[in-house]
């Protein structure tokens, strides 16, 4: 059994039009929501064995803020360019490449790919809960697989769906 936590980056700042999309930082709300979400995850005992983040500033910053709250070392966060604005199948490939020794993983990235991934990973009966995937949304899944290489759409069981306004 594997566990996967899918997290969309926190709210980003659109104030500087000269910045490349990849370099946009979090705004004030995002800088507040990410630690709050990290605390909520820590209270639930969530501590992944590996954290993998998009290379985009807003996603990596979200990963760092949440990692701090759950006691995961920032310098161990893995960055993957493939998680920057990916399609769901591209995220699956990143997950299939994880070390099989990891029983749990947390990934940070972007919509629409992460929303689509969470929706496609779950069972049809659970998908109503995932109609939206706002900034800093978290979908926690149990995966009845032994190896990351077996991950595929429809195999996940939604354990919990969290987002900042629901905390």
Image (tube, helix red, strand yellow):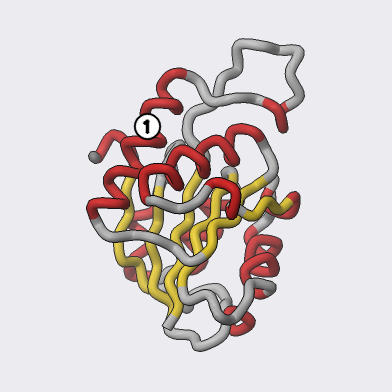
Residue 29 position by quadrant: top left
- 46 to 138, vertically: above or below: below
- Which quadrant, please, contains the C terminus? top left
For the point 47% across and 60% down, the residue is 119
- Count how many numbered circles sit on residues in the image: 1
Residue 36 position by quadrant: top left
- Furthest-bottom residue in view? 146
Q: Mark 1 points at which residue?
A: 33
Residue 109 position, x and y percent, is 58, 47
Crowd rating for badge 1 (residues with CA inside 10 Å; few <14, some 14–19, many 20+) = many
Left or right of 1? Residue 165 is left
For the point 76% across and 13% down, the residue is 18
User: Which type of secondary structure does the marked residue at label 1 adopt?
Assistant: helix
For the point 32% across and 54% down, the residue is 161
Q: Which of 64 and 157 is in front in this view?
A: 64
Residue 123 position, x and y percent, is 40, 72
Residue 78 position by quadrant: bottom right
For the point 56% across and 20% down, the residue is 13
Residue 158 position, x and y percent, is 35, 67
């Amino acid at each position: 059994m594997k566990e996967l936590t899918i997290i969309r980056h926190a709210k980003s700042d659109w104030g500087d039009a000269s910045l490349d999309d990849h370099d946009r930082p979090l705004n004030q709300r995002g800088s507040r929501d990410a630690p709050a979400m990290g605390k909520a995850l820590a209270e639930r005992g969530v501590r992944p064995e590996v954290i993998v983040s998009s290379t985009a500033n807003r996603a990596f910053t979200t990963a760092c803020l949440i990692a701090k709250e759950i006691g995961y070392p920032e310098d161990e966060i893995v960055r993957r360019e493939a998680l920057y604005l990916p399609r769901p199948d591209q995220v699956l490939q990143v997950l299939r490449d994880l070390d099989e020794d990891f029983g749990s993983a947390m990934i940070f990235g972007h919509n629409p790919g992460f929303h689509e991934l969470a929706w496609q990973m779950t069972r049809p009966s659970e998908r109503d809960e995932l109609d939206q995937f706002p900034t800093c949304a978290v979908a926690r899944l149990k995966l009845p697989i032994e190896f990351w290489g077996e991950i595929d759409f429809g195999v996940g069981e939604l354990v919990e769906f969290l987002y900042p306004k629901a905390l």
